[in-house]
Amino acid sequence: QVQLVESGGGLVQAGGSLRLSCAASGRIFSINPMGWYRQAPGKQRELVADINSGGSPNYADSMKGRFTISRDNAKNTVYLQMNSLKPEDTAVYYCYANIRQRIGVPGKDYWGQGTQVTVSS
């Protein structure tokens, strides 16, 4: 059984910073990509950023320059450093990973339970 466990959400004032973490556990052969989506009330879930196994990041345009994604392959963990937060960044942030459990088997999408990020003005 594969699990994604997120941590690091919370309440912060505009202009502040938060760091999210997501650790994958279980039977894992490889993870590619791993990243973050978010969903604000009344809106669709949207990509924040993801990162491939080689460490190449991909950001949504509105996050570029403020958010930094990184990963530790040895720990099967992805991080999201969020700086200069704005009230419009308020959302539930979901960790995402495409995980292959053994060689020769296609990867499967997994999601974390979500962590709330609230930015006050």
Image (cartoon, rainbow, N blue to C red):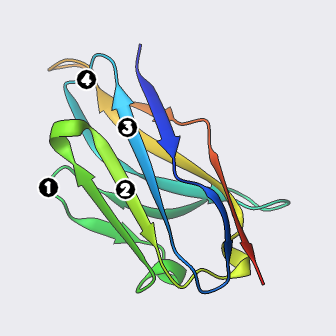
Q: Which mark is residue 28?
A: 4
The earlier-in-sequence mark between 1 and 3 is 3
Q: Amino acid at mark 1?
A: Gly
Among the two numbered marks 2 and 1 on one chain, the one whose residue lies closer to the N terminus: 1
Q: Nearer the viewer, mark 2 or mark 4?
A: 2
Q: Residue at 22% x, 38% y: name it.
A: 75
Real-space Cα separation, disc 4 to disc 3, in angstroms: 12 Å
**Does residue 94 lie above or below 118 as drawn?**
above
Q: Nearer the viewer, residue 61 or 66?
A: 66
Give SS at disc 3.
strand
Q: Earlier in the sequence, mark 2 or mark 3?
A: 3
Locate the C terminus and report the quarter of the image it occupies: bottom right
Q: Which residue is mark 2?
A: 79
Q: Amino acid at mark 4?
A: Ile
Crowding at mark 3 (Cα within 10 Å: few <14, some 14-19, many 20+): some
- Write down the residue under mark 1: 54
Examine the rendered structure and indicate whether residue 80 appears above or below residue 30. below
C-alpha separation, residue under disc 1 versus residue under disc 3: 17 Å
Amino acid type at circle 2 is Tyr
Q: Amino acid at mark 3?
A: Ala
SS at mark 2? Answer: strand
- Tell me whether circle 2 and circle 3 mark residues in contact (CB < 8 Å): no
